[in-house]
Amino acid sequence: MTSSPDPSAAEIVARLDLPTKVRLLSGRAAFALEGLPEHGLDGIEISDGPHGLRQQGDGGDHLGLAGSVPSTCFPTAATLGSSWDVDLVERVGGALGEEAVEQGIAVVLGPGLNIKRHPAGGRCFEYLSEDPFLSGKLAAAMVRGVQAHGIGTSVKHYAANNHESHRLVVDAVVDERTLRELYLTGFEIVVREAEPWTVMCAYNLVNGTYASEHHHLLTEVLRDTWGFEGLVMTDWGAANDRVAGVAAGLDLEMPYSGKAFDADLIAAVGDGTLDEAAVDRCATRVVELLQRARRDRQPSDRDAHHALGREAAAAGSVLLTNSGVLPLAPDLRRVAVVGAFAETPRYQGAGSSQVTPTRLDDVLTVLRGRVGPDTEVVYAPGYDPTTGATDPARVDEALAAAEGADVVVFCGGLPAPLESEGFDRADIDLPAGMVTLIEALAAAPAPVVVVLSNGGVVHLPWSDRVDAVLETWLGGQAGAGAVVDVIFGDAEPGGRLAESIPEHVAQLPADRNFPGRPRQVQYREGPYVGYRFHDTAGVPARFPFGHGLSYTTFEWTDVDLTGTGTDVEVTVTVTNTGDRRGSDVVQVYVRDRESAVHRPDKELKGFAKVHLDPGASETVRIRLDRRSFAVWDVAAGDWLVEAGTFDVVVARSSAEPVTGIAHDVDSADRVTPVPGPAGFLATDAEFAALYGGPPPAEKPARPFDRNSTLEDLGSARAGRLLGAVVEREALRRAQDEFPDPDEATQGMIRAAVREAPVRGLVILSGGAVPFRVVDSLIAAFNRDWRTAARLARGEPRSGSSGPAG
């Protein structure tokens, strides 16, 4: 007798009553989803995981800051992005998938691929690039690697979440063409090529509507256009109006909020405000996720993963300058190591992505183990690792260590309190103490190698006064081993910049509107971000996008373009002409010589990384398609290709072309002419023309509502008292979860409390603070004493205190 097939998710949902369906649409705990045990479906665990798992289980806190099970801390996205290595990133994703299987995690919350609109973004370490094509290709590789093990991913943060300041209430106002071409393209590549199980919506509003209830983004673009078939969840605490969210296509609210919105959803179905079919669709996607989740556990090879992390950290290390001092000679007599990061490594980002590593290398220990017995290694910390501050005594100690050395290795970068999730950097400078040390060492006789560990770009005005600069970003738990491998030549510096390093941040047009006002940021620079600005404006970056030196040399020959129209292939023969094994990256950009719309000088449309032994050659083949030549036509609502001549530029970086090939394209498309701004920062009138009308009005501070922040409420004395109480309680909880929370964690918590909407009191307390209490407080702050009293008695709230933009 044959058994009947398992019911489909839709069939299961059809048997559920409305409260049960609604219950499925929010988490069971901080990192857990509801199950349906009566239908043979247990709940599942999910975990933060852009560069390592943070499994916390049901006991996890809602900010995701509590301690977690030890997991391999791989290099952060800033490092992986600089690898330009699709295969390597897929292998890292595979290792993450293996550890997820071991820990019983069904979905890894990553990768993140928001565009690095501005280098001071606090979460730049967690994102891949300033370019959407590179971001999308590498994120797709990560998704494929994880999901090959039957583990889901959650591509984030969709969309236009490009800075941290006031991230839960800020409105990112961006014209449709820039949104499509720059900020959505990476997500589109991942969805179409890798089919992630889930997508995580962003905290912010996009053009006046919260991402968590943005029907255009969640349904029309993501599902109807790109064909996404998975589940959409909120970022933690991003739910605003759940009725609007469900109608828009938001399936799952995270984390557990005490089911604070359930009554609203049930009531909305009851009075016809919300079609129950929308609830059914969302519930079906949750059940589909429960059905496909892997339930078995298998051990993973942590030693192999540590070695992979070391390999990946080297592959993403970018050699910015080198006078010839690197790789270091094997017969060194004395090596001076200066910088507290050599002993106390900065290896991962701060905030919810923090991983408890399985082990942790440091440069000083690894270097001492690498050199021979005849080499003396001397060390001076030079600065405080928490602040980067120095003093005359520390400088003198560093100079004494450098005296008589064959080489000085300076380990510096950004201390964790200066960059973190939750807040943006005030500038992109290294700490002044580190600059003082670098300049003092550079004035001494010994050659100086500067090794940087930082999640975001820093100013490098001193780079031509030292002998080598190696940018390692945040290399994970094995990153220190990779540093030693690279400086001694045991591994090559395989990285190329995935983001431009400007001479000064003030050059960038986005700097005029970064992070913007608390309630609104206007992307008036349009598409002119990173190299798209530098190359178009003729304002050179200090180190351009795609730049990176090697220990060997490469020759590119037989460059050719075959095919017709928008279906073409670029071929390049790459030969390693040096005496070391190494890798090179062929980058292909497309330039439209004449266009009806303003366009960047050129844009990356293809790349390939090759690894070659000395004397070896390989022919690289890079395909270009219709999208490689297209622009988003707002009037047509489609990607169109103008007829005309394009340059296909084969380059080593955005600023170092090797050759350009003219290519004529015939097309019947008629691109709607749109005049661009006179400069690279649109005026009020120019921005309104690009946007298609006046931008959304900025939300006024009063009257207060659920989306007023504690910072807003601080204009009232009672609000200041409330803010102080909430901040004190949040910091107390951090003390409970961390014996000694670092300054970055405390800074993130303070920013989260100050800048978060008061609805967050309900969501992030797990419903311990009900909406009734919050709405009563809001009414009181608005001096509506009658409503405040009525709500305090438990009577229905008025609409004026409810969800608002």
Image: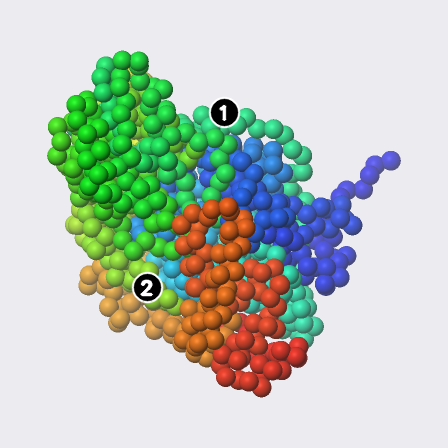
The amino acid pointed to by label 2 is Gly
720 vs 527, nearest the viewer: 720
Q: Please tell me whether residue 257 is drawn above or below residue 91 in the rendered image.
A: below
Residue 514 picture quarter: bottom left
The quarter of the image holding the N terminus is top right
The residue carrying pointer 2 sits among few (fewer than 14), some (14 to 19) or many (20 or more) residues within 10 Å by Cα, namely some
Farthest-out residue, front = 393
Residue 72 shown left or right of residue 379 in the figure:
right
Q: Amino acid at mark 1?
A: Ala
Residue 13 falls in image quadrant: bottom right
Q: How is the image coloured?
A: rainbow
User: Which residue corresponds to mark 1?
Assistant: 304
Q: Which residue is mark 2?
A: 516
Residue 92, position as x, y percentages in the image? 47, 33
Residues 777 and 193: in front is 777
Q: In which quarter of the view is residue 766 placed?
A: bottom right
Q: Secondary structure at mark 2?
A: loop
Q: Is residue 561 above or below residue 186?
A: above
Q: Residue at x 59, y 63 (%)?
A: 246
Q: Residue furthest bottom?
A: 786
User: Residue at image x 56%, y 34%?
Assistant: 99
Specify the label residue 499 is tagged with. none
- Label 1 near label 2: C-beta < 8 Å? no
- First in residue order: circle 2 vs circle 1: 1
Return the x and y of residue 130 as percentages of the image width and height: 33, 47
Q: Position of residue 362 (x, y in %)?
A: 38, 30
Query: Along the line of sight, which residue is nearer the eye, 19 or 174?
Result: 19
Q: What residue is drawn where x is 20% and y is 50%?
A: 504
The residue carrying pointer 1 sits among few (fewer than 14), some (14 to 19) or many (20 or more) residues within 10 Å by Cα, namely: few
Q: Reply above or below: 399 against 287.
A: above
Spatial CA distance of label 2 from label 1 is 44 Å
Q: Say whether residue 281 is visible.
A: no
